[in-house]
Structures are given as C-alpha cells and as structure tokens.
Image (spheres, rainbow, N blue to C red):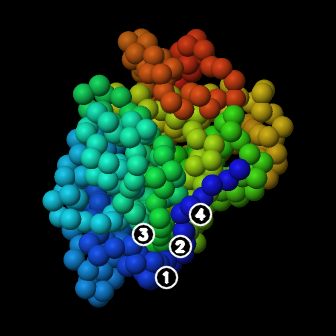
C-alpha cells in the first residue's frame, strides 16, 4: 500500500508552476526558515516575489536551528497565532520543514510543549507547503517531524497523516549554494532512507524501482557534484534521490540505522546525515544475511557488488577519527532500544548487537 497525499512540483522553475496552488491555500502564510539557508538558496526571495505580487501579507519566523527543539516549535506556534496566519511555508533543510509541520500541529490543536508527540490529540493542521533547499531528508513528502528535547537531550520523531505537506516544491537550483560538507551529509541521509526502505519490515516491492533509481542517482552523481558544485543536472539527480527516499520512508519508516544515528547527533553534535553515514556499513552487514536477495537486486542495478559498494563509501571524502566512550555507548544503547523506529527492523535487535556496532565504529568526519 502506498499513501502519498502531497502534490509534488519538481525541476527548475517549480515554484512558478506551483504558484497558483500555493496562493489558493490561504491569505496569510507564515514562512518558517532557518537563519540563513532559505535566503542563501534564493528560495525565500523567489517566494516573496510571488506572494507580494499576489498582494498577500506574509509573516516570517526565521529562528529554526539545526535539529529543531520543542521550544522553537512552541515559539513558532505562538507567532502563528499572534499573526493570525492561516497556512505555513517551510523553506530550508529538514530542520525548518520539520519545525513547520510541528508548528502547524501545535497551533491547530493548542498543544503544549509536552504534548507535541501525543498524536492522539491531533485533530487538524494548517496547510503546509514544503520547499527543500537541501537534498537529503525528503521530509517534503513525509508525515514525520523529528524534534529534539533540549532538557533530556533525546531526539525523536512523530508521524501523523495530518503532518504531510499539501505541496512540495523541489527546485534543484535551491541546492546549488550548499557547501560540500552539507551536500555530502545530506546525500548520505537520502541513501540511508533508500536502504532502510529495503531493511524495514514494512518494505514493499512497489517501492523498489524508486529505491533502485534513487540509490543509483546518488552513486553516479554525488562525487561529480562534490567536484563541481555548480553541476545542475547532478544536483537535480540528488534532489530526485532525496524525494524518492522521502516517498520510501513515508511508507516504510526508518529503522535501526536512524535510531543509532540520533545519539551521535544529540550527544556528539554530528550532523544528521553524517550520523547515518557512520553506521551505514555495520547496519548493512548486520542485515545482509536476512535480506540477501533484496540487497543483491539493488547491487545488481547499481552494477557493483557489496564490497565495491563499501569501497565507494570509503572513498567518499570523510576522515576517520571518533572515540566513543563506554559511558556514551551504554547511555546510547538504552536510547536506541527505546526509539520508535526500532519497531520497523526486519528482525529483533539486541542490546549486544547495538553495543557491538558502536564499539566497532571507525569514524568518519568530513575532510572537505
Ligand atoms: P538542516 O539542519 O536543515 O540544515 C543544515 C545546514 O544547511 C544549516 O546550517 C542550514 O542553514 C544550511 N542550508 C540549508 N539549505 C542551504 C542552502 N541551500 N545553501 C546553503 N546552506 C543551506 O539539515 P538537513 O540535513 O536538511 O535536515 C536535518 C534534519 O531533518 C534533522 O533534524 C533530521 O532528523 C531531520 N529529518 C527529517 C526527516 C523527516 O522525514 N521528517 C527525514 C530525515 C531527516 P540555516 O540553518 O542557517 O538555514
Ligand atoms: Fe534521515
């Protein structure tokens, strides 16, 4: 079963094609962004031209930090209420788009900070437009929002159909301004989502053509884009892969791989995509015997074997050095076991297997 309620506009100039649909959603949008990405990408300027020409009064909430906190979501919901906004436009990487989803639900359902994960209280949401400026999360087509509780240091997501954006506007030109490190990290996040579409116990062969095509796009275009950041065709392929990754996890959810990555982000401050990249090989090793047929079918499409895939990964411009303390590992094992995504693994994962993966990490830090 596939459920995909988001109308997707893709390609250079996507915003103009989507304009009529955006303008029909309401009269006063709240634009939700991070501090710089929406402007640097050019997306914010393009959007405000469209809104201004239509004579719409819009409001801006530009305080979303990386790995958005519950407090930021509450501040955004307060702003939405104060300004009387009737829909939202999230512009940026996964952080602002996820924050926009949670702001919409918090404001529409008058939720308090401690109720943001209580999806049984979700009755309605404000319409949301998502405009990605990174190529990685695919959150423009998912029902998930991943938030960080600053008090506990725990990062966790919620999923609800009311969180699906109404529209996704995916223009690869908005990713041209990404620096090589964010380009690399976010592409590896997309690759994680595609692989997890195979690992998940909700995997569906209907999705395999998207998974195969998305993974192939990353394999063929990531390194050329890192060498030539202005490669618009390569950028477009990476954004397409990210979109396919989002469509995939909207159906299958994420798995152990994302659960292992969250403590690396919250405790060590590693970016989300890098955290996934670090655990990609050990997770694939763990799952391979149980999913050999599905994974070999993917490698056949990629035109390489598993060891060559690992060689491709190793050849990415990451440098190795990370020393995980015993304390970090013990604390994280508990967090991983308690994470929602663990319900989606292809077989039950033990504390010992998690501990072994963390202990065996030879870390990757971007060299670029
Ligand atoms: P991000 O945290 O949104 O952004 C990373 C950095 O890139 C920020 O410094 C941002 O700047 C900058 N940036 C964004 N677009 C740019 C552009 N076009 N040019 C220059 N700089 C730009 O990173 P992300 O990897 O896209 O999102 C990660 C978040 O998404 C995590 O919280 C992760 O858990 C979540 N996620 C959600 C889903 C889902 O389905 N909901 C799936 C995967 C991941 P500013 O902050 O200054 O704007
Ligand atoms: Fe992710």
Residue 320 appears in the picture as rendered: no
Give the mark toward the camera: 3 or 2.
2
Q: Which residue is mark 3?
A: 174
Residue found at x 36% / y 60%: 126
Instruction: Kindly identify which numbered label has been placed on residue 17.
Output: 1
Residue at the image point whose x is 20% and y is 65% from the top? 84
Structural crowding at the residue carrying mark 4, measured as other residues with C-alpha within 10 Å and reported as few (<14), some (14–19) or many (≥20): many
Check if mark 3's residue and mark 1's residue have beta carbons within 8 Å: no
Badge 1 element: helix
Image disc number at residue 324: none
Q: Respond yes or no on whether mark 3 lies under 8 Å from ligand 1.
A: yes
Q: State the residue at coordinates (77%, 40%).
A: 295
Label 3: state its secondary structure. Answer: helix
Distance between the alpha carbons at the discs numbered 2 and 4: 11 Å
Dot 4 and dot 1 residues touching (CB under 8 Å): no
The residue carrying mark 2 is: 9
The mark that comes first in sequence, 3 or 2, is 2
Foreground pick, 232 / 3: 3
The residue at which mark 4 appears reads as 240
- Comparing 191 with 68, the one in front is 68
């Amino acid at each position: 079963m596939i459920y995909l309620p988001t109308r997707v506009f893709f390609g250079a100039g996507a915003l103009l094609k989507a304009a009529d649909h955006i303008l029909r959603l309401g009269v006063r949008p709240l634009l939700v962004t991070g501090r710089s990405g929406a402007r640097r990408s050019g997306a914010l300027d393009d959007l405000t031209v469209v809104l201004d020409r239509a004579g719409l009064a819009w409001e801006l909430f530009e305080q979303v930090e990386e790995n958005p906190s519950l407090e930021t979501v509450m501040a955004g919901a307060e702003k939405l209420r104060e300004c009387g906004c009737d829909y939202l436009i999230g512009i940026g990487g996964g952080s602002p788009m996820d924050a926009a989803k949670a702001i919409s639900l918090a404001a529409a359902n008058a939720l308090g900070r401690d109720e943001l994960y209580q999806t049984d209280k979700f009755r309605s949401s404000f319409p949301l437009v998502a405009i990605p400026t990174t190529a990685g999360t695919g959150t423009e087509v998912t029902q998930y929002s991943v938030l960080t509780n600053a008090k506990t240091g725990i990062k966790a997501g919620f999923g609800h159909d009311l969180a699906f954006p109404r529209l996704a506007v995916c223009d690869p030109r908005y990713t041209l301004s990404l620096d090589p490190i964010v380009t690399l990290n976010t592409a590896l996040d997309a690759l994680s989502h595609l692989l997890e579409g195979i690992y998940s116990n909700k995997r569906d062969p209907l999705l395999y053509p998207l998974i195969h095509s998305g993974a192939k796009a990353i394999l063929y275009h990531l390194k050329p884009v890192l060498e030539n950041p202005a490669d618009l065709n390569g950028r477009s392929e990476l954004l397409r892969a990210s979109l396919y990754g989002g469509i995939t996890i909207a159906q299958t959810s994420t798995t152990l791989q994302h659960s292992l990555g969250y403590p690396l982000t919250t405790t060590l401050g590693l970016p989300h995509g890098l955290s996934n990249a670090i655990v990609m090989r050990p997770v694939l090793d763990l799952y391979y015997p149980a999913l050999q047929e599905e994974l070999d079918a993917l490698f056949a499409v990629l035109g390489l074997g598993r060891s060559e895939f690992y060689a491709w990964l190793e050849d990415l411009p990451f440098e190795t050095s990370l020393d995980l303390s015993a304390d970090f590992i013990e604390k994280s094992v508990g967090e991983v076991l308690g994470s929602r995504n663990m319900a989606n693994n292809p077989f039950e994962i033990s504390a010992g297997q998690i501990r072994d993966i963390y202990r065996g990490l030879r870390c990757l830090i971007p060299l670029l």
